[in-house]
Every structure is written in structure tokens, then in C-alpha cells.
Amino acid sequence: MYLNQFLILAAALFCIGVYGVLARRNGVLVLMSIELILNSVNINLVALSAMNGDVTGQVFALFVIAVAAAEVGVGLAIVLLIYRNRRSIDIAEANLLKG
Amino acid sequence: MTAAILAQEALSRTESGVVNGFFAVLAIVAIVSALKMVTSSNVVHAALYLLVVLSAVAGVYVILGAEFVAATQVLVYLGAIMVLLLFGVMLTRAKIGTDTDLDNEQRWIGALVGAGMLAVMTYSLWEGFGDDKLPDTMVPQPTQAVSDSIFGTYLVPFEALSLLLLAALIGAVVVARRD
């Protein structure tokens, strides 16, 4: 098995996630795309850990999973707050700070 | 003697062929469902496509011999985060049926950015790693080694992470509380 097959799969998932973040209106869908991006990074960490025969990459993949869980909790709380204040979760409308 | 060695080699070749086949299936499933997820016009369907992507990634972890990470992926992502996201869909009263208005007008620029990034990353990965191979005798890393590493070398980051989780828990309650 080539190392690149894993890294290129991760790159493809990352780019699809970036497209999702840029193109989606719905706040929950943006959060889902961010989950996709974090997952692709985890594939890289685990693949390079297998390449080097070292568990450090796996440990950091577990840390990333925990941080992703924290992020999605706070992110959904913010999306709920936006919904409660504006009756919409279109993130393009959350532009109060725009100059 | 040589026949035995040849048989062994043939066996390991078919084995790696099987593993490569599994990888190909998982990669195709992951990429197709990821594309479906970012283009689907139904929020609940997008969440379910994300579920498929995350399961395929768990399979990739198993191929890489990271069984504990795969189990954590199933428990945390497929179990907890998906339920949170579906709760988010429900509480924000997104339309459950199809919705034509989920993409914004910069979608084509977004597609251009994604394709450009993919091209640059694929080229640089190809240049950087070429045909580096994973070690043939890839044994699964024992969970004991992972836990030794977490509770030994990385004990301080681990404790910081538990504090971060507590802060996120309290923060989410404070932000979303109705008063």
C-alpha cells in the first residue's frame, strides 16, 4: 500500500469540506463540513503514524476527535442562539460586525 | 523450501490485494458520499451522508491498524456528534423536506477554490512522497501502546484537553440557555 493513497484521499475529503464551508448557507451544514475537514486531518495523522510505526499520530488523532466534539457542542449552541435571535440560520445574515 | 517461500509470497500478495480492494471501496464510498453531503438539498440526508463518510473513515483506520482510533471514531462521531447535529437540525426547524435555498451564490467560487486546492495538494503530495510504501508487515498498534503514550508522554495535553471539554460543556450551556 502506498502512503499517498491515504494522503490523497484525505486531501480530497478536505477539499470537499472546504467547498461545503464556502458554499452552504445553513449553519448546521457548515458545521458538518467542518467535521469532514477535521476527519481528513485525522486520516493524515493515522497514516503517517502507521508509516513511522509510532503511536504519536494516533494519540493526536484522538485529541483531534475530542476537540471536534467540544467544537461541535459550542458551534451548535451558537447556531441555536443565532436562530433564536434572527429566526434563521442563514450564516450570510449574521453580518452585524460587517464594516 | 523455495516453493514454500513462493507460496508465502503469493499469499501475502493476495492479502495486500484484498486490503487494497477494501481501501478502494472505502475511498470511493467516502468521496461519493462526501460530495453528496455538500450538494444534497435535504439537511437530514446531508447528515446521513456524513454518517456514511465517517463510517468509511473508521474503516480506513482499521486498514491502517489503528483499532482504538476506529472504535473512538464510531463511538464519538457516529454516536455522539451525529446525534448533536441531528438535534441541531431539529431545534433550528430546518425544513425536513428538500430545500432549494441551501447553497449561497458564491458556490461556483467555492467549487473553484476546492478544485484548485485539491490540484495543488495532490501535486505536492506526489512530489513529496512519490511512491513511498507503508511497511509490509504492518501490525496493528496495540491499544496499550496508545494508552501508555497518552498517560505518559502526553499527560499534560490530555489534562488540558479535559479542561477544554469542561469549558466547552459549560460554555455551550451558558450560550444556549434561555433567560
Image: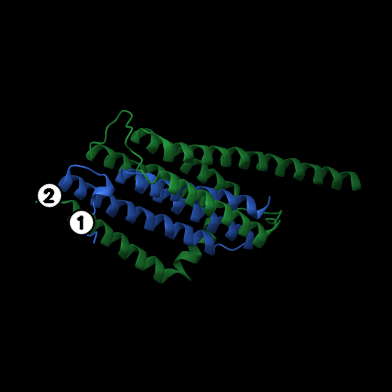
Chain coloured green: which letter?
A: B
Left/right of residue B131 with respect to residue B26 in the rendered view: right
Please provide percent x and percent y for residue B19.
66, 42
Q: Residue at x 24, y 59 (%)?
A: A98
Marks 2 and 1, how far apart at CA? 21 Å
Mark linked to residue B178: 2
Left/right of residue B147 with respect to residue A52 in the rendered view: left
User: Looking at the image, which is closer to me, B40 or A3?
Assistant: B40
- Numbered disc 1: secondary structure: loop
Whether B68 is drawn above or below B161: the answer is above
Which of the two marks, 2 or 1, is nearer to us in this view?
1
The quadrant in which residue B17 appears is: top right
Residue at the far left in the pictured view: B179
> Could you tell me which chain the residue with mark 1 belongs to?
A
- Numbered disc 2: secondary structure: loop
Mark linked to residue B31: none
Q: Residue at x 43, y 60 (%)?
A: A63
Chain coloured blue: which letter?
A: A
Residue at the far top in the pictured view: B97
- Is any atom of residue A52 visible in this view? yes
The quadrant in which residue A65 appears is: bottom left
Q: Residue at x 29, y 30 (%)?
A: B96
User: Looking at the image, which is closer to me, A34 or B148?
Assistant: A34
Name the residue that disc number 1 marks: A96
Circle 2: residue type: Arg
Label 2 Cα crowd, 10 Å radius (few <14 / some 14-19 / many 20+): few
User: Looking at the image, which is closer to me, B144 or A12?
Assistant: A12
| Count of marks overlaid on the render | 2
- Is any atom of residue B141 visible in this view? no
Whether B174 is drawn above or below B81: the answer is below
Please provide percent x and percent y for residue B125.
62, 58
Label 1 Cα crowd, 10 Å radius (few <14 / some 14-19 / many 20+): few
